[in-house]
Image (spheres, grey):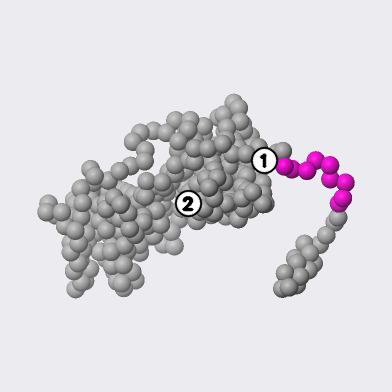
Amino acid sequence: MLLQISKQKLLDILTIVGSAIERRHTINILSNVKIQISKDQLIATGSDLEVELKAKCTLNDGECIVEGETTIPARKLLEICKSLPPQAILKLTATEDDRCIITSGKSKFTIGTRPTDDFPMLLNGELKGVVVEVEQSELKRLFDKTAFAMAVQDVRFYLTGTLLEISPSLLKAVTTDGHRMAICETVIESNTPETKKVIIPRKGVSEIQRLVAANNKKLKLYFSNEFLHAEISQTTKDGDELTVFLTTKLIDGKFPDYSRVIPTRNDKKANLTLADFKDCLTRVAIL
C-alpha cells in the first residue's frame, strides 16, 4: 500500500472515525484505524464493537500509488498529522514486515501495523430491515431535545439509551431516567407497515448528534433487530465530499410504556413568555 495525501484531508477522516476508537481496549487491534485504498477512494474504519464509524472519500489522480489495506495505531497517526504544517503532504507506505513508514518533508515516522484480517467488523453484509429517510436537521433536533433525559449508569440498562418509535410517517424519540421524560417527533418516510421500536445506546446517540448537521440534506437510517446503520453526507472545510457510515448495536430490552405516565386531564394552564420564565428560574435556582 502506498498513499500520498494532504495532511488536512487525512486529518478530517481520522477525526471522524477516531471518536469510535478507545484508547485502551482488551482487543489490541481495536486501538488501530483500518485504512483501505483503491484507485479512486479511501475508506477509514474505527470501532469499539459497540459503535463502528466508516468514512469514505474520493482520491484525486496520483494520490493512490499502490492499492492495499492495513491497520495503523489511530492515536499515533492522528498526533503525527496534527504535528505537521498545514499544507503538508504525507506519504504512507505499508511494508510486508507489518510496518508503516510515514514521510513528510524531512520528517519520517515508522510505526507498527496489524493485518486487516484481524480487524472485527460489526456488519459482514447488507443490513435488511426498516428503512427511514429523514432530514439531517430534523434528526439532530430530535436527539438534541431528548438526550438530556437519558439515564446514566442505571441498573435498568434500557433507560441508558433513546427509544425510537418508527411508524410509516412519524419518528418519535423518547428518553427517561425515571424522574423526568422527554419526547420529540418528526415527519419521515419509511417502508414499515407497522410501528417498530428500538433503543439506541448513549454512545450511538452522541455520535449521531456530532455527525449530522443543521441542514436539509436527507439521510437514510437502516434498522434491524440488532443494529442501526446510518449513511451521512458531509462536506469538509476544503470542500471535499465525505460519506460517513455509522453502525451501532441496539440495546436489547423493553422500554417502559411511557404513554401511561403522561397526564391526560390538564385543567391548569398558563401562557408564559419563554425568556421571562427562564430568567425567573435562573434567579430562583441560585438559592
The residue under label 1 is 258
Residue 277 at what x, y percent from top left? Answer: 79, 64
Which element is circle 1 on? helix
Q: Quadrant of the C terminus?
A: bottom right
Left or right: residue 255 compared with residue 118: right
Judge by depth and name the residue closer to the eye, 171 or 108. Answer: 171
Residue 53 at what x, y percent from top left? Answer: 39, 49
Residue 69: mark? none
Name the residue at 56% across, 36% down: 254
Magenta stretch secondary structure, dominant: loop
Q: Which residue of the protein is positioned furthest toward the front in this rendering? A: 155
**Amino acid type of the residue that numbered disc 1 sits on in the rendered structure:** Tyr
Residue 218 on the magenta segment: no
Q: Which residues are magenta?
A: 261-269
**Amino acid type of the residue that numbered disc 2 sits on in the rendered structure:** Lys
The residue under label 2 is 203
Residue 208 at what x, y percent from top left? Answer: 50, 50
Q: Quadrant of residue 167?
A: top right
Task: Judge whether 60 appears above or below 188 on screen.
Answer: below
Left or right: residue 179 compared with residue 112: right
Q: Quadrant of residue 283?
A: bottom right
Residue 61 at what x, y percent from top left? Answer: 27, 53
Sequence order check: which comes first, mark 2 or mark 1? 2
Q: Which residue of the protein is positioned furthest toward the left in this rendering? A: 97
Name the residue at 78% across, 68% down: 280
Task: Judge whether 10 appears above or below 204 on screen.
Answer: below
Q: Which residue of the protein is positioned furthest toward the right in this rendering? A: 267
**Residue 34 in sight here:** no
Query: Pointers 2 and 1 in contact (CB under 8 A)?
Result: no
